[in-house]
Image: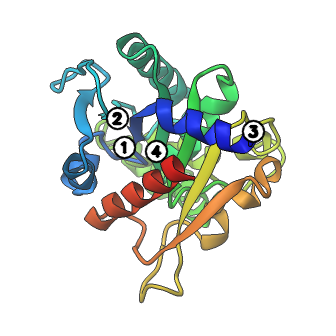
Amino acid sequence: MLLLLIWLGFAAQAETLVLIQGYQAKGADWRESGVTTALSRAGWIDGGQLDGGDDAAVAGAGLRFYTVGLTSDAQLLRQLPQLERQIQRLRQLRPDDNLILVGHSAGGVLGRLFMVRNPEAPVAALITFASPHLGTESAELGLALSQSPLGWASSWLGDEYDILGRSQGLYFDLVRERPGSLLFWLNRQPHPPARYVSVVRDDRLSLVGDLVVPVWSQDMNQVQMLRGRAWSIPSDANHGLESKDGELLLAILRRLYSS
């Protein structure tokens, strides 16, 4: 009965989605990929972008989703204050709502970092798509390239073109967890009560699979402090966001609301 009451409370309050993009992505990518089209068809209203950019965020009743503006190639501890400020603004716009954080790739790790660093925030659920919760060899390759002659050469082109240099801190954040790394610390911190859902790009369901983040790293059940607490959903997509992820997100939300 207690569990039923908890779920009924979740269904009654969790009305706001925050969509967090991944590495080198923009908030608008959620719209351009077609993910938000499915949300809109199901009655979710586009509340705009929370960073005060071209899409000024708006308040109002009903189900709404918002995107955020982030320096998405910066290390996660630099992105975190940006996300915190924008979520604080959202809480001012919709003070009575719980939040559902939805993150793609590195954005899912950032969402989890936000929850750990802000356990008092009213986050009812975290849903991640293809996120490297235990790290990825791709980040290690990027880190190696940033420290190679190629990385030194790119630094001569100026910050605008020095992608390897700008991303070096983020690469280190996303290497496979090891003592001294951000993920090693994060994965051993208490995580607040919430629903944790991992969408895993299962290479058994796709001809190509995810070439950026390995399957084992995408499942939050593999995180030391979340074992047995996460719900894992296999997906046949590749690493990037696709329009069918919108339908999958809707299915997850319906199950969260009806459970």
Task: Name the residue carrying label 4.
Answer: 102
Q: Quick one: SS at disc 4?
A: strand
Q: CA distance from mark 3 to mark 4?
A: 26 Å
N-terminal of the two: label 1 or label 4? Answer: 4
Residue at 26% x, 63% y: name it: 243
Tell which residue pokes out farthest to the front in this image. Answer: 1
Q: Which mark is residue 2?
A: 3
Q: Secondary structure at mark 1?
A: loop
Circle 2 crowding by C-alpha within 10 Å: few under 14, some 14–19, many from 20: few
Query: Dot 2 corresponds to which residue?
Result: 159
Q: Residue at x 15, y 25 (%)?
A: 54
Quadrant housing residue 173: top right
| Disc number lying in front (2 or 4) | 4
The answer to which of marks 1 and 3 sits earlier in the sequence is 3
Q: Pointer 1 and pointer 2: residues touching (CB < 8 Å)?
A: yes
Inspect the image, locate mark 1, and give the three-letter code of the amino acid beneath it. Asp
User: Is any part of residue 234 visible from this angle?
Assistant: yes
- 129 lies above or below 192: below
Which residue bears the numbered disc 1? 162
Give coordinates of residue 131: x percent, y percent: 54, 56
Quadrant of the image containing the N terminus: top right
Is 154 left, or right, of 54 in this rendering? right
- The kind of residue tagged 2 is Asp
